[in-house]
Image (cartoon, grey):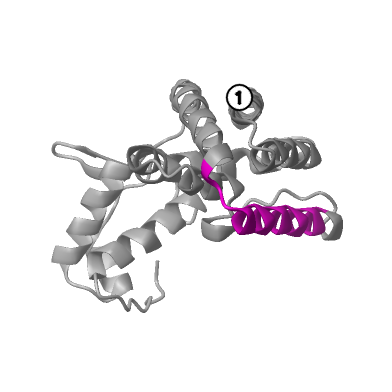
Amino acid sequence: MNNLISIKSATLSEDIAQQLTNAIVQGQIPQGSKISEPELAKQYGVSRGPLREAIVKLEGLGLVTRTANVGARVIELNTQDMLDTFTMREALEGMAARLAASKMPSDEINNLYALLDKHQAHLDANQDEHYVQQGGNDDFHLRIIHASGNAKLIRLLTEELYAVIRMYRRHTADQRSDPRQALREHKAILDAIANHEGDLAELLMRRHISRASQLLKQAMEHSSVASRS
């Protein structure tokens, strides 16, 4: 953390929180590491006030925990927490897909097909390497969540669960097999949404996330065994 990072935002603490979130998700700030306020304040060139506000936001996102007499630390991923998180995700994103099937406008559906073509091109050009850095407008799941039009559902999935879900996806991406299968499942979900088949869209989304959770479970168990050997 030696390089000074330029922060330019109307809401400084939110900008810092976004920077820290990305650093944690991408593994630049390791799991279990202690959050050093003086070090981060120096790195980002800010005072401790907005930095503390950012850390509180990260606690709300589930990326940081705080312990008395110890301070704030980045969470450590574990299999049971992943399964609990993905059980919630399966139900909520299934509902989002159902709602999107009746609400997503045709231009946004076409944009999503174009996004999947972009993901296909990435796999073709990178020997089936996982598209692990997807986020924001490049995240298929996030776009469907927003298309649901349900404000509370969107808040739960994009504010309370999204960062941790990204962290799990990033952590085990290299150990998961067959990224083209995930792409095929994305296309089937989008076809159901495009055809306004809400029941089918929900079923396919739930199956997709259930499969992902089992693959993540296997990857995390494999990683745990490998780290002990």
**Residue 68 belongs to the span the image colors magenta:** no
Q: Is residue 104 visible?
A: yes
Q: Position of residue 145 (x, y in %)?
A: 49, 43
Residue 69 position by quadrant: top left
**In this picture, residue 100 sits left or right of residue 204:** left
Q: Is residue 171 above or below residue 200?
A: below
Give me the residue at 33% from left, 76% from top: 7
Q: Position of residue 27 (x, y in %)?
A: 50, 51
**In this picture, residue 179 sits left or right of residue 101:** right
Tell me the quadrant of the picture where the C terminus can be found: top right
Give me the residue at 34% from left, 43% from top: 151
Tell me the SS state at disc 1.
helix
Q: Is residue 29 visible?
A: no
Q: Which stretch is magenta?
A: 103-123
Query: Which of the pair 202/63 is nearer the observer?
Result: 202
Q: Position of residue 228 (x, y in %)?
A: 59, 27
Residue 160 position by quadrant: top left
**In this picture, residue 131 sits left or right of residue 120:** left
Query: Which of the pair 12/157 is nearer the observer?
Result: 157
The tally of labels here is 1
Q: Is residue 37 above or below residue 69?
A: below
Give me the residue at 68% from left, 36% from top: 189
The secondary structure making up most of the magenta span is: helix
Amino acid type of the residue tagged 1 in the rendering? Asp
Give me the residue at 60% from left, 24% from top: 199
**Residue 104 belongs to the span the image colors magenta:** yes
Query: Which of the pair 44/69 is nearer the observer?
Result: 44
Q: Position of residue 8 (x, y in %)?
A: 32, 79
Residue located beneath label 1 in the image: 199
Tell me the quadrant of the picture where the N terminus can be found: bottom left
